[in-house]
Amino acid sequence: MCVPLRDPMCSEVVEVHDIPTAFRVEIEQFFNVYKDLEGLPTQTAGFGDRAEAFRVLAEARARSAAAETGR
């Protein structure tokens, strides 16, 4: 999740769990239903920490690079 560097509403947010619980619930609900109109399933698994985010991004980049090279 990214926020503007100088956004006063997010100035205290360092880790994902610094985000108010109600807002995290709203974000997760969005991702649970955003493909409903297309009839595509979605699934969420809560929120991880920064290390997990970097791991997931690295895996996605590796899959993308492999797909581009045809591997």
Image (spheres, rainbow, N blue to C red):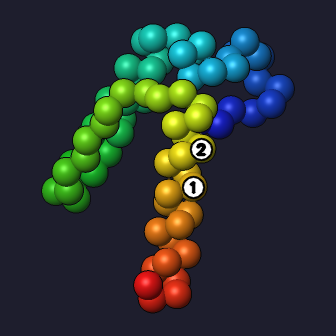
Local crowd at mark 2 within 10 Å, few (<14), some, or many (≥20)?
A: few
Q: Around disc 1, counting alpha carbons within 10 Å, would you say few (fewer than 14), some (14 to 19), or many (20 or more)?
A: few
The answer to whether 44 appears left or right of 66 in the picture is: left
Give the vertical position of 7 relative to 68 (above or below).
above
Above or below: residue 53 compared with residue 40: above
Task: Give coordinates of residue 25: x percent, y percent.
Answer: 38, 20
Mark 2, secondary structure of its residue: helix
Mark 1 highlights which residue?
58
Q: Is residue 1 visible?
A: yes
The reply to whether dot 1 and dot 2 touch (C-beta < 8 Å) is yes
Q: Position of residue 33 (x, y in %)?
A: 26, 40
Q: Quick check: 47 left or right of 14?
A: left
Depth order, front residue of 32/70:
70
Q: Which residue reaches farthest bottom? A: 70
Establish if 61 lies above or below 52: below
Which amino acid type is marked by label 1? Ala
Residue at the location (56% across, 63% down)?
A: 61
Residue occupying image coordinates x 55% and y 75%: 65
Check the image and name the residue furthest to the left.
39
Is residue 10 in view from this perspective? no
Drawn side of residue 34 relative to residue 53, left or right? left
Amino acid carrying label 2: it is: Phe
Quarter location, residue 3: top right
Q: What residue did someone put label 2 on?
A: 54
The residue drawn where x is 27% and y is 51% is 35
